[in-house]
Amino acid sequence: MAEFAKGDHCLLTDGKGRKFLLTLDPGSVFHFHNGMVAHDDIIGRPQGSVVKSSLGGRLVAVQPRLADYILNMKRGAQVVYPKDIGPILVWGDIGPDMTVLEAGTGSGALTMALLRAVGPGGRVVSVERRDDHAEHARRALEAYLLGLPPNLELRVGEVADQVADVGPDRLVLDLPEPFGVVEAAAESLPSGAIWVSYVPTIPQVQQTTEALRAAGCFAEISNFEVMHREWNIDGRSVRPDHRMVGHTGFITVARKIDPA
Ligand SMILES: C[S@@+](CC[C@H](N)C(=O)[O-])C[C@H]1O[C@@H](n2cnc3c(N)ncnc32)[C@H](O)[C@@H]1O
């Protein structure tokens, strides 16, 4: 953990805050606008070391946080942003040893966070309807996890068809039509299970909420969005950053109950 080893992920940050993600591979060389750095010059160095590029650039080398990894990895489908992943995990109450059914796998970003939350004693089944996205996610997850763990199952298909088979403690949906999954969730989610869905527009939120209400077996339905504003602290310039991610998605959380 203290020193970089072969196969570790490494985040390099230059003096202007530009970030570059590597997986350390002996013999490989990282090239960027300010020269190059041999991976062998990082392997064996302590986390937090400053490494110099061939053109004299200084780069800080650290192990990426999951948030860094997600924001800097190659993406296929749009990922869930870290600002939303935290609340999805906390309000969805996703924790050790749980079984989570997730869709769509997309780029696999949320899958990474779900796996970490359930731990080795839990199980994540992630469903993706598009072959190309499923393949991209499989490669992204293999790269991040250095192989696929036995408690992760990647399935290609429609998530509504998987709810009965998996019977999850938590159902997490990042797809455009979560309302299309309500019927299957009403029939097959165990009582007490939690529904979390994530969509970019209010008509989708409204349709999802109305479908959950109409099903008659979901309680504590709540809808919210998350704002994350960075602040600039520099001498007398103490103010919000000029730029921010203005909008990502709305989160809907609900609890499956047994109304009988
Ligand atoms: C926005 S992406 C998910 C991104 C993912 N959460 C991440 O963080 O990388 C939405 C994905 O859902 C998939 N999808 C849409 N409807 C689906 C369904 N009914 N069942 C399974 N996958 C679905 C799409 O093909 C797409 O890849």
Image (cartoon, rainbow, N blue to C red):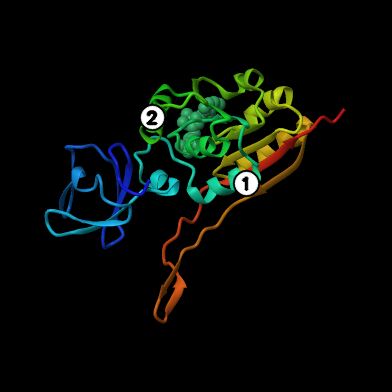
Comparing 3 with 186, the one in front is: 3
The residue closer to the viewer here, 79 or 18, is: 18
Q: Is residue 48 above or below residue 158?
A: below
Q: Earlier in the sequence, mark 2 or mark 1?
A: 1
The residue where tag 2 is placed is 142
Amino acid beneath label 1: Val
160 sits left or right of 3 in the view: right
Taking the spot 42% from the left edge, 67% from the top edge, the residue there is 242
**x 27%, y 38%: residue:** 6
Residue occupying the far bottom of the picture: 236
- Residues packed near mark 1 inside 10 Å, few (<14), some (14 to 19) or many (20 plus): few
Label at residue 43? none
Task: Say above or below: 110 vs 138.
Answer: below
Residue type at mark 2? Glu
SS under mark 2:
helix
Q: CA distance from mark 2 to mark 1?
A: 26 Å
State the residue at coordinates (41%, 44%). Answer: 70
Label 1 sits on a secondary structure element that is helix
Can you give x and y, in whole percent of width and height, for residue 177 in the image?
Answer: 58, 32
Which residue is at the far right?
260
Quadrant in which the C terminus appears:
top right
Residue 90: assigned label: 1
Q: Say above or below: 248 vs 166.
A: below
Camera sees residue 76: yes
Determine which quarter of the picture holds residue 100. Answer: top right
